[in-house]
Image (cartoon, rainbow, N blue to C red):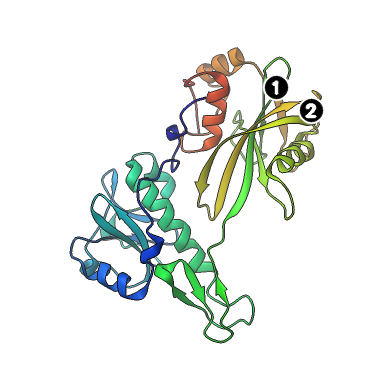
């Protein structure tokens, strides 16, 4: 199987040091001049060239402090702000991700995931009182009822389904550019096993029954709070019947068709940022040259 390091955010290098998420340790780390801080806005992160722009705590803007952990002999924080100032060369995570080192990629996906959660979960879900951050930004506590709230992660399955001829099933969303196809995907429902979610989503979207399901890899996907859990599955039926809502067209592709159509520009695949491209190329047997979006 291909190396999961070939897609973004898959190999974080920092130690999250959850044991140090206490007030005195956090303050001590923030006071260390070697500590570095990243500004994270609602739609962008601070960059410099092809890298993230890390600054000293004394130069950091005001905002929600998020303790990220340790790497390369330093402590790393993020600060959640409404907007990253123009002086910090703001770029979206999608724009910045592919040029980042494994260490920076792991730190930024951690930072963005926590910052996104704080922006949308400022009130206690039990009593409605404004909650307060704790444990380096990884918990919110209610000062009224004492409830603790933890960062939300929404698990989703993403799957490359093949048939008895080892053709791959790819589909397209109505909003996508002409010619773009990708793997199928969908969110896990309460009380559902991941393997059953694969079978349900494929059945709902394209009318294909799936038998064997095998785990492949996973990818944090903070857009805004997903965890993509990748699978390979084997179809036990072949006639495609799309739902017309999530998927407007789907079909079986041979490896030669993927190779030729990609080179000719008739097939656009997902970009290398996503696990979906990795699933397709793992099935294909190598890198696919051609169009991607």
Could you say where residue 270 lies in the image, as x and y percent from the top left?
A: 53, 33
Left or right, 92 with respect to 234, comes to: left
- Which image quarter: residue 129? bottom right
Could you say where residue 118 lies in the image, as x and y percent from the top left?
A: 49, 68
Location of mark 2 (residue): 240
Q: Residue furthest front?
A: 19
Could you say where residue 138 lies in the image, as x and y percent from the top left?
A: 46, 66
The residue under the point 61% across, 81% down is 128
Q: Are marks 2 and 1 in contact (CB under 8 Å)?
A: yes
Left or right, 38 with respect to 283, comes to: left
Q: Is residue 131 above or below residue 56?
A: below
- Which image quarter: residue 218? top right
Q: Is residue 258 above or below residue 86?
A: above
Q: Which mark is residue 252?
A: 1
Question: As rendered, which of 258 and 191 lies closer to the eye?
Answer: 191
User: Which element type, helix, strand or loop, lies under badge 1?
Assistant: strand
- Which image quarter: residue 21? bottom left
Left or right, 234 with respect to 81, comes to: right
The residue under the point 41% across, 58% down is 111
Could you say where residue 42 lies in the image, as x and y percent from the top left?
A: 44, 61
């Amino acid at each position: 199987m291909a190396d999961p390091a070939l897609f973004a955010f898959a190999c974080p290098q920092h130690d999250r040091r959850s044991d140090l998420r206490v007030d005195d340790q956090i303050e001590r780390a923030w006071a260390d001049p070697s500590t570095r801080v990243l500004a994270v806005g609602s739609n962008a992160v601070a960059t410099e060239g092809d890298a993230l722009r890390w600054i000293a705590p004394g130069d950091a803007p005001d905002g929600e402090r998020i303790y990220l952990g340790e790497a390369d002999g330093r402590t790393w924080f993020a600060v959640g702000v409404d907007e990253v100032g123009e002086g910090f060369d703001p770029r979206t995570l999608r724009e910045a991700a592919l040029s980042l080192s494994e260490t920076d990629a792991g730190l930024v996906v951690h930072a963005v995931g926590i910052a996104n959660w704080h922006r949308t979960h400022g009130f206690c879900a039990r009593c409605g009182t404004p909650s307060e951050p704790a444990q380096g930004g990884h918990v919110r506590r209610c000062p009224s009822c004492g409830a603790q709230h933890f960062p939300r992660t929404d698990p989703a399955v993403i799957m490359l389904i093949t048939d008895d001829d080892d053709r791959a099933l790819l589909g397209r969303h109505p909003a996508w550019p002409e010619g773009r196809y990708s793997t199928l995907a969908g969110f896990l429902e309460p009380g559902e096993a991941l393997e059953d979610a694969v079978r349900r989503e494929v059945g709902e979207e394209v009318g294909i029954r799936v038998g064997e399901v095998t785990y492949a890899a996973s990818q944090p996907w903070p857009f805004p709070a997903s965890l993509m859990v990748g699978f390979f599955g084997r179809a036990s039926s072949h006639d495609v019947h799309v739902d017309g809502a999530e998927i407007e067209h789907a079909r079986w592709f041979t490896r030669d068709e993927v190779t030729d159509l990609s080179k000719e520009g008739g097939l656009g695949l997902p970009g290398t940022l996503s696990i979906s491209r990795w699933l397709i190329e793992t099935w294909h047997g190598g890198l696919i040259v051609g169009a991607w979006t």
